[in-house]
Image (tube, rainbow, N blue to C red):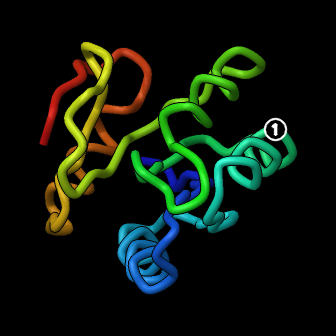
């Protein structure tokens, strides 16, 4: 798999940093870490990442709402993370926290165009 530019949306700074380190270990480039819905939308439109990994529930806003706004302008493959939220659209790729490196890698593969979507 080629290295991808990935935008992380996670309101917990520590989790965002740990995820960034995991992605770096897989050979990807984290082009940004955002903590709010508004910042997620602005960064996605500005940075045009190859993939987004988005926390479903943010302290300030909602990751699902952010992705809906982004997808209307520029479709970007994405993966949702959740610690318990369960109201995802069919065929969404969902990582349930906590997750291991293998599950993250599998989700990234599934998020690529032409892959089957699933909950991991």
Indicate the position of residue 88 as horizontal and vertical percent values.
29, 26
Looking at the image, residue 105 sits to the left or right of residue 10; the answer is: left
- The residue that appears at 65% across and 58% down in the rendered structure is 36
- The residue that appears at 54% across and 42% down in the rendered structure is 51
Give the labeled residue for mark 1: 45
Going by the picture, which residue comes out furthest to the front?
60
- Closest to the observer, 112 or 43: 43
Per the image, label 1 sits on a secondary structure element best described as helix
Q: In which quarter of the image is residue 97?
A: bottom left
- The residue that appears at 51% across and 43% down in the rendered structure is 63
Q: Is residue 39 placed above or below 23 in the rendered structure?
A: above
Residues packed near mark 1 inside 10 Å, few (<14), some (14 to 19) or many (20 plus): some
Q: Is residue 17 placed above or below 107 in the rendered structure?
A: below
Looking at the image, residue 59 sits to the left or right of residue 21; the answer is: right
Indicate the position of residue 108 as horizontal and vertical percent values.
34, 45
Indicate the position of residue 23 as horizontal and vertical percent values.
42, 68
Q: In which quarter of the image is residue 92?
A: top left
Q: Is residue 3 placed above or below 99 in the rendered structure?
A: above
- The residue that appears at 81% across and 38% down in the rendered structure is 45
Q: In which quarter of the image is residue 107?
A: top left
- Closest to the observer, 117 or 63: 63
Looking at the image, residue 110 sits to the left or right of residue 6; the answer is: left
Indicate the position of residue 15 as horizontal and vertical percent values.
39, 78
């Amino acid at each position: 798999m080629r290295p991808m530019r990935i935008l992380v949306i996670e309101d917990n700074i520590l989790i965002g940093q740990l995820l960034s380190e995991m992605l770096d270990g897989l050979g990807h480039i984290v082009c940004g870490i955002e903590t709010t819905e508004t910042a997620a939308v602005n960064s996605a439109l500005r940075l045009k990442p190859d993939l987004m990994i988005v926390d479903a529930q943010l302290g300030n806003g909602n990751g699902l709402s952010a992705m809906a706004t982004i997808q209307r302008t520029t479709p970007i493959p994405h993966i949702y993370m959740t610690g318990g939220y369960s109201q995802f659209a069919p065929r969404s790729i969902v990582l349930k926290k906590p997750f291991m490196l293998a599950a993250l890698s599998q989700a990234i593969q599934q998020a690529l165009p032409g892959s089957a979507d699933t909950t991991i």
